[in-house]
Amino acid sequence: MIRPATAADVATIVAIGEAMHDESRYRDPLPWCAPKVTGLLDWLLASDDGLVLVAEAGGAIVGGFLGMVEDHWCSRARVATDFALYVVPEHRGSTVAARLLGAYITWARDRGAVLVQAGITTGVHVEATSRLYERMGFQRVGNLFEIGDPKHG
């Protein structure tokens, strides 16, 4: 079941977020900060422009999605963007990720988003996740480049 998160879910979402962080390429250069993530979740839950979804199976949260909608930086047109999509390893390959993405797309369109964006920057299952996004109607539109801290490689 996919549902909007509540304040009662925040601690579980933070724990799942930490698992996502630990699995990702971000674990070394970006130290996990639970209070910052909690603040983001609180803001998203309180804002009409914020989205926090959870996926449940057997009464347990097994995945989630964080996103928001805002005016594009150069326009008053609304654009939806994601912060995170995560499914615990035991539920990958199921329909959880697709259902979370579908709920995000519907939510974004209901809020007037003319563009709905989602990215993959964790380095986890990039090609499989890309194929899922494309099956959901997303198109590849660019690339992400970065320069890391020279002290950390």
Image (cartoon, rainbow, N blue to C red):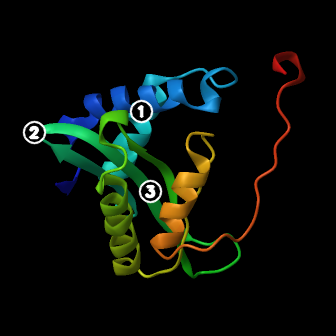
Q: Name the residue under label 2.
A: 59
Look at discs 2 and 3 and give the one toward the viewer. Answer: 2
Q: Position of residue 118 (x, y in %)?
A: 54, 61
At label 3, which amino acid type do we have?
Gly
Can residue 80 be seen from the camera position used here?
no
Q: In this view, does 76 lie above or below 58?
A: below
Look at discs 1 and 2 and give the one toward the viewer. Answer: 2
Query: Which quarter of the picture shows residue 38?
Result: top left
Can residue 138 be seen from the camera position used here?
yes
Q: Name the residue under label 1.
A: 17
Q: Position of residue 66 (x, y in %)?
A: 41, 51
Relative placement, left or right, of 104 versus 126 is left
Which numbered marker is on residue 111? none
Q: Position of residue 108 (x, y in %)?
A: 40, 72
Alpha carbon distance from label 3 to label 1? 14 Å
Q: Residue furthest left?
A: 59
Q: Position of residue 130 (x, y in %)?
A: 57, 59
Alpha carbon distance from label 2 to label 3? 23 Å
Q: How crowded is mark 1: few (under 14 residues within 10 Å), some or many (20 or more)?
A: many
At label 1, which amino acid type do we have?
Gly
Q: Earlier in the sequence, mark 1 or mark 2?
A: 1
